[in-house]
Every structure is written in C-alpha cells, then in structure tokens.
Image (cartoon, rainbow, N blue to C red):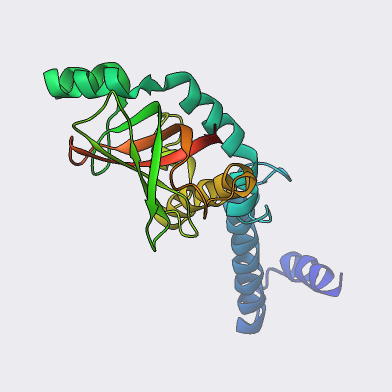
Amino acid sequence: MINKANASIAEMRGERLPPPPRSMWRRFGLLGGVVIVVLAIALDTKVVQIGSSEDLRQAAFSAAAYGTKTFPEIKQAIEARAVEGAALQQAIAANKDEAIAKYGIAGGSGPVFSVKFVGIAGERQASGLYEIKVADVPDVKIRIQTGPAINGTELRDATGTVSFGQFTNQIEYQNAGSALNNEMKKVVLAAVDTTALTGKTVSIVGAFRLINPKSWLVTPVRLEVQ
C-alpha cells in the first residue's frame, strides 16, 4: 500500500520512482519457476485405477496358483484332442506335415500331439520312465514319464491355448510349464503306485513333442492301471 501511495504522489509531482530492487524480481522468478514445475508434474501424472492391469501393487505371478487353476482345463483339452496311438503313428508316417496340421500344435522345438493308447509297462528306469509296449503301434518306442522329475513343456504347449504373450517375461512362461507338470504329479501320478507298473496293463492319455517319429516320450494327464 505504501509503495502504491508513493507511486501516486510521484506521478502527481511528475517524478519517476526507481525500479524495484533486484531481490523482488528474483522472488518473482522463483515463484514463476515453482508454478511451472507444479504444472509439469500435474500434466505428467497418470491416474491408475486400483486393481487395473496398470496397478503395480498387484500380486506377483504365482506359478503354483497358475498350475492349480489351469491344469484341469489343460487335462480336459488334451483328453478331447487325443488320437489313438495307431492312427496317429500311421498319419505321421504317411505325411508328417498333414498329420501336424490335422492333429498337432506346431511351435517350439517341434509339434506337440495328444495321444491315447493301452499297453504293457516294461521295466522302470532310474529316471522314472517306463517303456510301454503297445500292440498296434509296434514300430514306435513309446515311453511315459512318471517322476519324480517331469521334464518338458508338452502340457503347456499341447492345446495351443497358452502363449508367451499371456505372461510378463520368459521366466514366467517357463515357470507356467513347470507348474502344470507339478500339478499333474499331484493330480494324476499321486493316485498311482508309479514304482510298481512293470508288467501291468496301463491306459494312457497324454502329450508328446515329435522329435523322432520312432520314439515318443509321453507326459500323461491320465494314467490308469487295468
């Protein structure tokens, strides 16, 4: 108020007041800078809805929970897709590409087929593998995995419904495959004495990756002793 009064008096006298001190302009400059920074922060701030896909507070990927939730769907899909062993072997021998297009899921290190067969289990190997003699598939060495270690990602890849794009990174994608194998052990293999299958007739539904048409390594989703 005093400055304004002094300015008015000076104008009446025809006098010119000296310019405001530099400290005043400095304060104005600092205030303007603060306003600009606040506006920039406001413009760069994004509102994220709680629970949305952009909410970084969401729980990390749980492989165990994924396996428990997804395995029943995978099991059902493999059972629905499964082709009799003899028919599948003949289709692959006749024209592998046509067999893949008709029965397989392409991708990875080789196509994955769902298959079913009945045969007699041979001697159990140290790794938990059994060779199964299937009468109507005499030209193929068929083995099944019974643990304790279940290797491969055949269960993950057998249906075409699980893809890398559903996961954050390669580690989660790989862990999803392992989780399905682990859940299969709990649901399928735990119900069977897998140490005493030798000489018994077994009914198998499972999946294998076609690397060698003469050798199938099957990961089961159903194993029944007859």
Give the quarter of the figure containing the N terminus.
Answer: bottom right
Between 42 and 210, the one nearer to me in the picture: 210
Where's residue 2, x and y in %? 86, 74
Q: Is residue 199 above or below residue 64?
A: above
Give the residue at the far right of this rendering.
Answer: 1
Q: Is residue 61 above or below residue 204?
A: below
Where's residue 37, x and y in %? 60, 63
Where's residue 29, x and y in %? 60, 71
Between 44 and 179, the one nearer to me in the picture: 179
In the rendered structure, the answer to whether residue 64 lies left or right of residue 166 reads right
Give the residue at the far left of this rendering.
Answer: 94
Q: Is residue 150 above or below residue 106?
A: below
In the rendered structure, the answer to whether residue 53 lies left or right of residue 210 reads right
Give the quarter of the figure containing the C terminus.
Answer: top right
Q: How many marks?
A: 0
Between 172 and 181, the one nearer to me in the picture: 181
Where's residue 224, x and y in %? 55, 34
Between 201 and 171, the one nearer to me in the picture: 201
Identify the residue at horizontal 80%, vertical 67% (top origin).
4
Identify the residue at horizontal 67%, vertical 54% (top origin).
59
Can residue 150 be seen?
yes
Q: Is residue 41 above or below residue 95?
A: below
- Residue 160 image-quadrant placement: top left
Can residue 54 be seen?
no
In the rendered structure, the answer to whether residue 211 lies left or right of residue 205 reads left
Give the residue at the far front of this rendering.
Answer: 199
Identify the residue at horizontal 67%, vertical 46% (top origin).
47
